[in-house]
Amino acid sequence: MTRPNRFTNVTRIGPVQVGTHHDGRGRTKHTAACTAPGCNFSADYLNRAAAELAARTHRCNP
Ligand SMILES: [Zn+2]
């Protein structure tokens, strides 16, 4: 998987990485993306707390 290099403030919660980035239109987005093999979970959130909560509660698909 390619990882955008403009992510900032990246943290890892379990297999999920949470990063903050700007969408190019002046808005800040928070993305949670799972790095586990075979798991394609990735989602954008409007705030950091939501992204981190999603990361904490994420369970990989079997
Ligand atoms: Zn996963």
Image: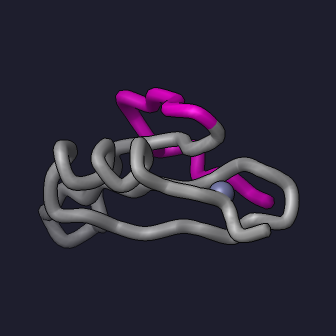
In the rendered image, residue 2 lying in the magenta stretch gets the answer yes
Please state if 23 lies on the left or on the right of 56 as rendered: left
Nearest to the observer: residue 6 or residue 42? 42
**Ligand 1 located in image quadrant:** bottom right
Please state if 27 lies on the left or on the right of 37 as rendered: left
- Give residue 57's position: percent from left, percent from top: 41, 51
Residue ranking furthest to the right:
37
Nearest to the observer: residue 55 or residue 62? 62
Tell me the residue at 50%/32% (across/down): 13
Please state, as top left, top right, bottom left or bottom right, where the N terminus lies in the image: bottom right
Vertical arrangement, residue 39 with respect to residue 5, above or below: below
Res 23 → quadrant:
bottom left
Nearest to the observer: residue 19 or residue 13? 13
Please state, as top left, top right, bottom left or bottom right, where the C terminus lies in the image: bottom right
- Give residue 7's position: percent from left, percent from top: 45, 42
Marks counted in the figure total: 0
Tell me the residue at 39%/56% (across/down): 31
The image's colour scheme reads one colour
- Give residue 9's position: percent from left, percent from top: 36, 28
In the rendered image, residue 21 lying in the magenta stretch gets the answer no
Tell me the residue at 21%/54% (across/down): 50
**The residue stretch that appears in magenta:** 1-14
Vertical arrangement, residue 42 with respect to residue 49, above or below: below
Res 8 → quadrant:
top left
Tell me the residue at 47%/44% (across/down): 6
Please state if 46 lies on the left or on the right of 52 as rendered: left
Res 39 → quadrant:
bottom right
